[in-house]
Image (spheres, grey):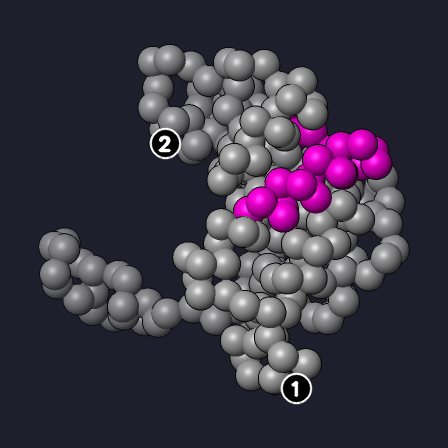
Amino acid sequence: MTGSTDVWEVMSTARTIRRFTDEPVDDETLSRCLRAATWAPSGANAQEWRFVVLRSPEVREVVAKCAAHALEVIEPVYGMTRPADDDNSRRARTNRATYELHDRAGEYASVLFAQKHFPTASELLLGGSIFPAMQNFLLAARAQGLGACLTSWGSYGGEALMREAVGMPDDWLLVGHVVVGWPRGRHGPVRRRPLADVVRQDHWDTPATGIG
């Protein structure tokens, strides 16, 4: 599936992409994604965010180390193993793509998203000033036909490595890390629970009427 200017199609088909071609993402296309990120709201319109594009071989090597360590952590948590070559179940296909992403982590461009830390605000509250920018980035990537994956490689011990690699000051929060590239495969549609499972009306336990 190629790019789209239909916002509804973009949102409903913005699947997480974990398999990419070898074609690099050009500066103009990536710039559009980053520009879209800056259009997001932030608390008091402070815009105290920083987007660090990771492209050099040295930094990509650090990303690969973080990815490998993260894989060691999530394998037992999710009960993941490398699927057999002849296993074509949905779970196997998903796991195969996950392993490929981690194995090739050092080959792709990616972006770190950081937010200035203000001691008077909780980290959750500060997240409201950077998560919308990350979502804008993901949607802009999808609109242009790119694939993207929000990773956990900045967690599980990887944060210190990433912070050191890019020289991130102590008073900034490393909030997210997104791998971006040209997809090997296709986008959406996304699979989500029905509205009736998650929407209530006026009370926590009262189903919403007329919404679904």
**Closest to the observer, 198 or 160:** 160
Q: Which residue is mark 2?
A: 124
Question: Quick one: SS at disc 1?
Answer: loop
Question: Does residue 195 appear in the picture of this structure?
Answer: yes
Label 1 crowd bin: few (<14), some (14–19), many (20+), radius 10 Å: few
Is 65 colored magenta in this rendering? yes
| Image position, residue 12 (x, y; %) | 54, 65
Q: Residue at x 42, y 14 (%)?
A: 118
Q: Residue at x 53, y 19 (%)?
A: 172
Q: Quadrant of the N terminus?
A: bottom right
Q: Tell me: residue 147, above or below residue 166.
A: below
Q: Which residues are magenta?
A: 50-70
On the picture, is 107 further left or further right than 123? Answer: right
Q: Residue at x 56, y 59 (%)?
A: 11
Q: Amino acid at mark 1?
A: Asp
On the picture, is 21 further left or further right than 36? Answer: right
Q: Amino acid at mark 2?
A: Leu
Residue 37 occupies which quadrant of the picture? Answer: top right
Residues at marks 1 and 2, CA–CA distance in whole angstroms: 43 Å
